[in-house]
Amino acid sequence: MEWFHDIWQTCFGHMIWDRWEAFGLLGEGLFFARLLVQWASSEKAKKPVLPISYWYMSLAGCVILIAYALHIGRAVVLLPNVVGIALYARNLSLELSHRRREQWRNNCGFDRPDFPWPTVSVVVPVHNEAGVLAATLRRLNEQDYPRDKLEIVAALNGCTDNSREVTADFDVKIAESERSGMSFGKNLGGEAATGEVLVFVDADTVLPPDGIRVIVEEMHGRGKCVGTVAGAPDRGGGVVRFCFWLANRHASKKQYHAPGGVMLMQRTVWAETRFDEQLPQGTSTDFILRAREKGAAYAYVDRFSAVTSIRRFEKKGIVRQMLSWRRNHRDFVNGRRENVMHKEYEPVRED
């Protein structure tokens, strides 16, 4: 057996075997064991599965190996585990959040066939939007929501194109006026709507098939509320997506902007507040601030993203538009409403 002894000495003889080495092996053992747990769970489910124990074992392995790397002074062991612990912690947080949400959904009974879904009116303000309107209305007509509880209202305000002809191809209630205006169009649709819940959707914005259902679920149990939905660009590169990420972050921190072109509220909230038809811009921020002053809670929905057009970015410039929205928000919050009142609305499509 001298040959075996020689091989052992060559491969492992220079290694130090002590308590710290055993501690490091424990960390590696956890990483190996998590793969066995994941494999067993997948075999049982007959599909790929990542059990929550996978993330706990990953975190424990990282913590052990970080301590081990600090003791032996090896950056090659330390750095990957420092990055790994952040990623594993984030995944664990998402998994726990998902489980809490599913438990909440089960407690609320959303999947029960007799769940009392409220009536919803989706209001789409339309001013010369024939080029983008069909896609918006098509997706609204495909919503996974009880059809007898869903109403789509196209608020045609001052249209001189063939927007009315576009709406004829869809199951849509039409409210029409020769007068035009951003806030006027929303109020026009709100007056024609009959639903308990109002969802205002820009004419260049599309929702996923479960969008309305998710919005109603998120409003459930909140009482009186007003809110917005996370947004995503319909095209564009990294800079545009980063700007939307910033806008979504601001909205999630209750800075009252509608990055996805979607607003949600009970009909009573709209009736008490209504959109200010004298404002040339910043109408969503203004509405939410005033609704909150009247006791409405703020709801931010990020279980999906409303995909909206970036044509305003393309026409005005990304930096210019972002700064304009930011200035409007500061003016409203700081009581300088007159600064916004003196601005002009800049259209992004031809009348």
Image (cartoon, rainbow, N blue to C red):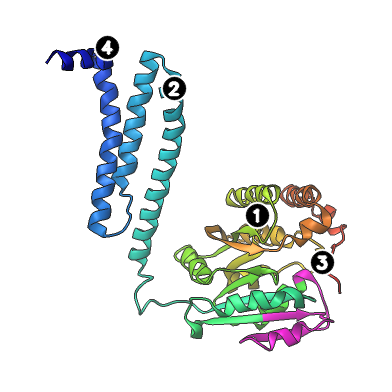
| Residue 162 shows up from this direction | yes
- The circle on residue 76 is 2
* Side of 217 where 182 appears, left or right: right
Q: Is residue 28 left or right of residue 293?
A: left
Q: Give the Cα separation between the discs numbered 3 and 4.
A: 78 Å
Residue 66 image position (x, y, % from top left): 38, 24
Cα distance, mark 4 to mark 2? 18 Å
> Which of pointers 1 and 4 indicates the residue nearer the eye?
4
Which residue is at 73% across, 51% downward?
329
Q: How far separated are the C-alphas under marks 1 and 3?
A: 19 Å
Select label 1 or label 3 by which is in front: 1
- How far apart marks 1 and 2 lie (CA) works out to 45 Å
Q: Residue 277: within the magenta? A: no
* Magenta residues, start to end: 154-183
State whether residue 187 appears in this view.
Answer: no
Give, as a three-letter code, the residue at label 4.
Answer: Ile
- Label whose residue precedes the other's in the sequence (3 or 4): 4
Q: Residues within 10 Å of mark 1 (few under 14, many from 20)?
A: many
Instruction: Please state which amino acid type lies under the numbered disc 2.
Output: Val
Residue under label 1, please give it: 256
